[in-house]
Image (spheres, helix red, strand yellow):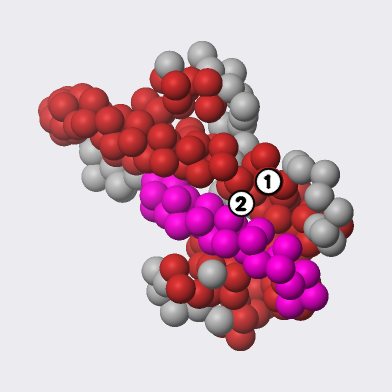
């Protein structure tokens, strides 16, 4: 019930159970199943998925609790009437938060990306604190990333994000954001603006 109340700030709390199970099923089905050609193979795979669905949903429940608790802490700070926020900086932080946590994010986000959300949200929280202390430095960092975030927004508008290469670019952008705004949290892999520029050029 507590988690349902947190989820209600994003989407109907009635969707929560369905989204957690949907995310679990998506995670279990992410491996290639093209080898399945016979009924016996299908039934064997079906049994494995059926067995693993409940524990996988339990893991997603715990992950959702962490994500939504972080979201509930960050969002009110971005909606305050404090005058020391620079408008462009605030808009960028809000936009980034919406790109991660939005209606359907649990069921739509691929499992490999979703498990990194707690770190991405921690990076947003740290960025928000530092942006208030030094908005000029935050804006300089924001402008470093603008070419990549603009490209992602255009790809989203054109429906390109189902392409695995664009998905990889998206998660590399998230890792670069962590490196730029909250380096102490660490990144999953080596990222740099130069590498992302090459990815973007190929895309």
Q: Which residue is mark 1?
A: 77
Is 125 a magenta residue?
Answer: yes
State the SS at label 2.
loop
* Dots 1, 2 in contact, CB < 8 A: no
> Based on the displayed image, in which of its 4 quarters is residue 59 positioned?
top left
Query: Residue at horizontal 82%, vertical 59%?
Result: 84
Q: Residues within 10 Å of mark 1 (few under 14, many from 20)?
A: few
Circle number at residue 161: 2
Along the line of sight, which residue is nearer the eye, 198 or 122?
Answer: 122
Residue 172 location, x and y as percent? Answer: 53, 68
Neighbor class of circle 2 (other Cα within 10 Å; few <14, some 14-19, many 20+) is some
Q: Residue furthest bottom?
A: 194
- Callout 1 secondary element: helix
Quadrant the C terminus occupies: bottom right
* Type of secondary structure dominating the magenta stretch: helix
Lateral position of residue 127 relative to residue 34, left or right: right
């Amino acid at each position: 019930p507590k988690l349902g109340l947190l989820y209600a700030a994003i989407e109907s709390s009635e969707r929560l159970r369905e989204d957690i199970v949907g995310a679990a099923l998506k995670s279990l089905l992410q491996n290639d199943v093209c080898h399945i050609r016979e009924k016996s193979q299908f039934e064997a795979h079906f049994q494995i998925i059926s067995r693993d669905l409940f524990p996988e949903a339990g893991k997603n429940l715990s992950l959702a609790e962490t994500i939504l608790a972080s979201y509930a802490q960050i969002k009110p700070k971005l909606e305050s009437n404090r005058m020391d926020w620079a408008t462009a900086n605030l808009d960028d932080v809000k936009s980034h938060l919406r790109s991660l946590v939005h209606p359907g994010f649990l069921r739509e986000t691929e499992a490999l990306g979703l498990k990194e959300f707690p770190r991405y949200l921690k990076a947003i929280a740290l960025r928000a604190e530092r942006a208030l202390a030094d908005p000029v430095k935050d804006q300089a960092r924001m402008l470093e990333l603008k070419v990549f975030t603009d490209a992602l927004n255009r790809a989203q508008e054109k429906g390109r994000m189902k392409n695995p290469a664009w998905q990889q670019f998206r998660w590399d952008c998230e890792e670069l954001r962590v490196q730029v705004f909250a380096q102490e949290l660490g990144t999953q892999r080596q990222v740099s603006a130069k590498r992302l520029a090459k990815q973007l050029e190929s895309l």
